[in-house]
């Protein structure tokens, strides 16, 4: 490994699960060690199977690439996703791993720079692949929810993946249009990236049950819904429906959300319900079944009762609870 002077270079994290052994990698890979970026391999090389296994045993989840390599990475990842998802030989675990890695990498980049067009493009591609994975593979959703989170992962990132995956599946079963399903899938991956724009004390409220938030904390934390909308509102590559879902994902029928809306659209109600469900699992460290039981008690009146009952049925049919 050769040390790089990293002071004047910018780096972007990518998931090791979006790479494959013995595959030519057209960009440099770096690791972060002792507060500096160190080159792991030069561009144009591959990682041997044994080295790849060693990295996984060491629980190294991320490499870093130069920001200037983002376009190369996008092209490389698009090819890998297409190859894996269309392969008859790839197992469901392999398909989930690469799609999950793509989605987590995209959300990582959006957290780092929510105004980045390249990060947003990575997100839309990841959402498209996530949808294909779930629609073509009945066990995919259960595999996504059943996987343990890497210790170094930001829980916000895994939460965004869960919300996106379950929202697109639920929207499909609710007979939403193709465009609506795509919109809720993309919105799910980015809905909470505004949390990164909060101060550290307020950001920490993400891991605290909303039932334990004081009125002042609830008000401050609710700003994350508006933060991303402000940053992205003038970006021509994002449609208004996705922005609306991101800004309204904490709203419900009680009017207690940050925007005090009492008439959520169907898509807003879907993403809000699923956001609240997965939030319970994360903040209370409880099982999906326990979170569903709490949801059925805590959220009556916040969402359409028939929707809640159908959501319960879907979770059971998908093997999540």
Image: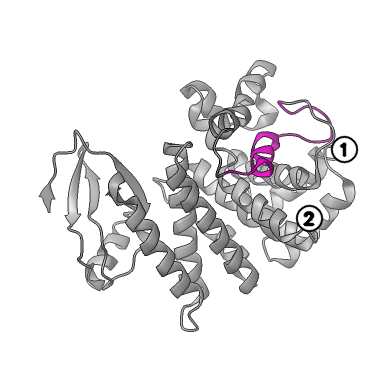
Q: Is residue 257 magenta?
A: yes
Q: Which residue is mark 1?
A: 301
Which residue is at the front of the view, 246 or 60? 246
Say whether disc 2 or disc 1 marks the residue closer to the N-terminus: 1
Q: Is residue 117 magenta?
A: no
* Residue at the limit of the structure toward the front, as seen here: 236
Residue at 77% across, 63% down: 173
Q: Position of residue 199 (x, y in %)?
A: 48, 21
Q: Residues within 10 Å of mark 1 (few under 14, many from 20)?
A: few
> Magenta residues, as a range?
238-258
- Badge count: 2
Seen in the picture, residue 53 relative to 90 is either above or below; the reply is above
Which residue is at the front of the view, 299 or 112? 112
Colour mapping used in the image: one colour
Tell me if 126 is positioned left or right of 118 in this view. right
Q: Which residue is mark 2?
A: 311
- Under tag 1, what secondary structure? loop
Tell me if 103 is positioned left or right of 19 in this view. right
Label 2 – label 1 distance at C-alpha: 15 Å
Residue at 14% across, 44% down: 4
Q: Position of residue 78 (x, y in %)?
A: 43, 64
Look at the image and tell me whether residue 149 can be seen: no
Q: Position of residue 216 (x, y in %)?
A: 65, 16
Tell me if 284 is positioned left or right of 260 in this view. left
Residue at 63% across, 53% down: 185
Q: Position of residue 295 (x, y in %)?
A: 76, 44
Look at the image and tell me whether residue 68 can be seen: yes
Q: Quadrant of residue 20?
A: bottom left
- Under tag 2, what secondary structure? helix
Q: The C terminus lies in which quarter of the figure?
A: bottom right
């Amino acid at each position: 490994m050769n040390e790089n002077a990293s002071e004047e270079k910018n780096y972007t994290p990518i998931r090791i699960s979006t790479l494959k052994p013995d595959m030519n990698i057209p960009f440099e890979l770096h690791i972060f060690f002792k507060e500096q970026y160190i080159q792991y391999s030069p561009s144009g090389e591959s990682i041997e199977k044994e080295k790849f296994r060693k990295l996984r045993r060491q629980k190294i989840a991320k490499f870093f690439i130069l920001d200037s390599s983002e376009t190369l990475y996008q092209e490389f990842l698009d090819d890998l996703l297409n190859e894996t998802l269309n392969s008859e030989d790839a197992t469901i675990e392999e398909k989930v791993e690469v799609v999950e890695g793509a989605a987590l990498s995209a959300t990582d980049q959006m957290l780092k720079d929510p105004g980045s067009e390249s990060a947003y493009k990575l997100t839309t591609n990841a959402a498209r692949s996530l949808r294909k994975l779930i629609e073509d593979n009945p066990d995919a959703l259960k595999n996504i929810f059943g996987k343990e989170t890497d210790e170094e992962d930001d829980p916000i990132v895994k939460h965004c993946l869960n919300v996106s995956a379950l929202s697109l599946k639920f929207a499909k079963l609710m007979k939403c249009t193709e465009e609506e399903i795509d919109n809720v899938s993309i919105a799910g991956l980015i809905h909470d990236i505004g949390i990164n724009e909060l101060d550290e004390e307020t950001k920490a409220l993400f891991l605290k049950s909303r039932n334990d938030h004081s009125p002042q904390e609830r008000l401050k934390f609710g700003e994350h819904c508006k933060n991303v909308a402000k940053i992205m509102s003038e970006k021509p590559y994002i449609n208004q429906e996705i922005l609306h879902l991101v800004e309204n994902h904490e709203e419900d029928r009680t009017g207690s959300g940050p925007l005090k809306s009492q008439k959520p659209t169907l898509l807003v109600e879907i993403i809000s319900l699923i956001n609240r469900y997965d939030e319970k699992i994360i903040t209370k460290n409880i099982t999906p079944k326990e979170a569903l039981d709490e949801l059925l008690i805590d959220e009556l009146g916040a969402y359409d009762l028939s929707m809640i009952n159908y959501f319960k049925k879907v979770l059971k049919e998908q093997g999540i609870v």
